[in-house]
Image (cartoon, helix red, strand yellow):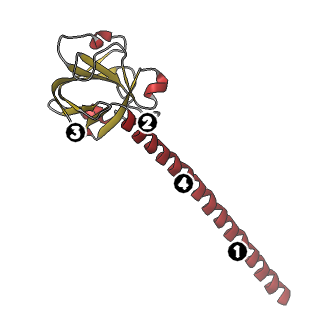
């Protein structure tokens, strides 16, 4: 009888040790995973603010959008920031056209753009952090091959292009230039 009790206690102690070890391993793995994703998030935020410090920036406060603008709209550029269509206007001059992802695959800068409304303010900051203020005039959907939206319309505007949720079409937001100012 003593052996049965002793064996039972021994098995119980062994089981407790195994469960304790498994718990410690799970804690270490969980901490490692959280640490990896946390460090990745911190690095992405650091790169974002570094890019915003050194490049023009777009901000739509009502939609909580704030993103650096780089030259070009190739995949490498718009996977890191918003891209300016080379050959279109400049800040406060002509049709300043930019594109960015509204997908969680890349930078999700324009995810909230689908909530834009006429009258909202779009602020651009150049490298010296001078402000260029635009007011949203319209938002509409086009097919990807409709490049007329990049044309010069004889006024000073911003044209923002992003994908629709299904990725098959493009959402276009047009803002009309109002004024410039320093910080």
> Which residue in the structure is indicated by mark 1?
16
Q: Nearer the viewer, mark 2 or mark 1?
A: 2
Q: Mark 2 and mark 1: span between their CA atoms?
A: 43 Å
Q: Nearer the viewer, residue 145 or 12?
A: 145
On residue 104, the disc is 2
Q: CA distance from mark 3 to mark 2?
A: 32 Å
Task: Decide which of 5, 97 is in the foreground and name it.
Answer: 97
Q: Nearer the viewer, mark 3 or mark 2?
A: 3
Q: Is residue 53 visible?
A: yes
Residue 1 can be seen, yes or no: no
* Residue matched to label 4: 34
Alpha-carbon distance for marks 1 and 4? 27 Å
How far is the residue under mark 2 from the one under mark 4?
A: 19 Å
Instruction: Mark 1: give few (<14), some (14-19) or many (20+) Cα within 10 Å.
Output: few
User: Dividing the picture into quarters, in which one does residue 183 lie?
Assistant: top left
Find residue 86 and report its horizontal and vertical position in percent.
Answer: 37, 16
Q: Earlier in the sequence, mark 1 or mark 4?
A: 1
Element at badge 1?
helix
Q: Return the residue found at the far right.
A: 3
Tag shown at residue 183: 3
- Residue 155 position, x and y percent, is 17, 15
Give how far apart the Cα atoms at labels 4 and 3 are.
38 Å
- Indicate which disc, 3 or 1, sits on the residue closer to the N terminus: 1
- The secondary structure type at the circle numbered 3 is loop
8 on left or right of 162 = right
């Amino acid at each position: 009888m003593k052996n049965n009790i002793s064996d039972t206690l021994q098995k119980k102690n062994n089981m407790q040790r195994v469960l304790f070890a498994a718990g410690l391993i799970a804690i270490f793995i969980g901490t490692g995973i959280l640490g990896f994703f946390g460090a990745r998030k911190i690095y992405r935020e650091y790169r974002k603010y570094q890019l915003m410090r050194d490049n023009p920036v777009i901000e739509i406060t009502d939609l909580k959008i704030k993103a650096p603008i780089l030259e070009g709209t190739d995949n490498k550029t718009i996977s890191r920031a918003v891209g300016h269509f080379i050959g279109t206007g400049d800040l406060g001059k002509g049709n300043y056209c930019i594109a960015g992802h509204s997908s969680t695959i890349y930078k999700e800068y324009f995810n909230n753009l689908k909530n834009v409304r006429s009258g909202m303010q779009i602020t651009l900051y150049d490298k010296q952090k001078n402000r260029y203020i635009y007011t949203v005039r319209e938002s509409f959907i086009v097919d990807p091959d409709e490049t007329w939206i990049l044309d010069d319309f004889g006024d000073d505007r911003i044209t923002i292009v992003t994908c629709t949720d299904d990725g098959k079409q493009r959402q276009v937001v047009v803002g009309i230039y109002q004024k410039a100012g320093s910080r």
